Image: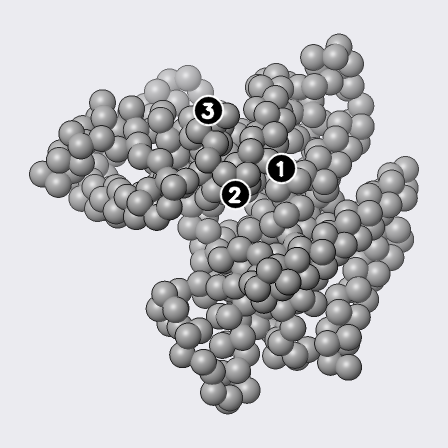
Amino acid sequence: MQIEFGASFIFLLFSVFITLLLMYGPKEEKKFLAAVIITAFLLRVIFMYLLHWQSYLDGFKGFVLGDDRLYSMKALKIALIWQNKPYNPMFDMGGADYGINPFTYLLALYYRFFNCNYLSSKLINCLIGSFTPLFLYFTAKNIFSPKIAKIPFLLASFYPSIVYWSICNLRDPLVIFLITFCAYLISGLKNSRSKILRLCLIAFSIYLLKDLQKICFYAAIGAIVCSVIYRLLASLKKKEWIILSSIILAAFIIVLYNQFWPVILKQIRLIIVNNSALYLSDSAGYRIYDCKFLHAIRAGTLDIAGFIKAYFTGLAYFLFSPFPWRITRMSQLIACQQTMLWISLLLFSILGFREGFKLSFNRTMYILTFVFIGISFFSIAEANIGAAFRHRDYFAPLVFIFAAKGIMQFLGKNDTER
């Protein structure tokens, strides 16, 4: 009865959200939006059950990926501690705090109140994954138009890998939701009557990203800082702009560089250690740092040319892997099909970003800066094709917005409705 009640609660939440959408959503589009969300949710539920039972029959107890099992076990441990019950020491694999994040606590709440059922708990991500595209729709609508917004909405609803992450107990759907939700809040900040509430929600979303995915947290902070600096400089006259820019540059060179250089070097060393561990972890690893660069780092110096080479090598792997000529397993062959679609969307997004700067400079600048910083960090830190493919989806929904506009521009359909 408890298991059925847990699943029933998720379906009840879903029904409430759909009802609210039909009551308060945009009049012209609310039926379309509701129909797509319902289809996306049911599709996820069906695939979730099929994949779960296939995994169970194969002897993996319903777990699809390693992290699927990790977060489930950690969440069960937290739920048992809350109830003052003993837990299996194997739940501490990787360390007592390893794998603990906001998603783990969300999963633990489910286990605490509705019983520990690995199958029905996956409905949480089905719910998150099916509603995330709605905020992408409103973001695209704020930047471009309702007509353009339908394309990224549909892409994010049925993009194969995004669907796949949302039918497992993984943190990724919550990360994608927070990134998309934050972009939506920022895109409507200028015309909003409740700016204080939006700013609080933005701050809370970014705070949650800190423990969920630090790279995305740093990318969000960096994008906001760059946007604020640009607005400050744009509001100044030419002479004032030159003076302020010179002061900022001088302060960075004289003070910040000396203070932060040891910290930056330490972080690069940590990244390289993590990169090496990922590279050696399985056959899907790849190496971007050569021996010359590693020797320089150990000596306390940074080989700039070597770092630039590593960055662009990592960037190519992060954006375009798995490469057709380096496929070693069936999963990579399947992923390669989607990568072709991703590359096409990435190319169309170049046109879209250009149009975005014309129509909504500040919103487009925040999203592009976030995507650029995030992808750059992952490019120098990643060393596994599977992880790169998965983490790429953190930025894919935002790219979809501008790819949609690029497609319309390429087809010669200049939609100016706002």
Identify the residue shown where x is 47% and y is 82%: 87
Residue holding disc 1: 397
Q: Residues within 10 Å of mark 1 (few under 14, many from 20)?
A: many
What separation in Å lies between label 2 and label 3 (alpha carbons)? 20 Å
Looking at the image, which is closer to me, 124 or 401?
A: 124
Identify the secondary structure beneath mark 3. Answer: helix
Q: Earlier in the sequence, mark 3 or mark 1?
A: 3
Question: Tell me, what colour scheme is on the image?
Answer: one colour
Q: Which mark is residue 159?
A: none
Foreground tag (2 vs 3): 3
Task: Please give left or right for residue 68 compared with residue 22 in the image.
Answer: left
Identity, as a three-letter code, of the amino acid under mark 2: Arg
- Tell whether label 3 touches label 2 (CB within 8 Å): no
Identify the secondary structure beneath mark 2. Answer: helix
Outermost residue to the top: 412
Residue holding disc 2: 390
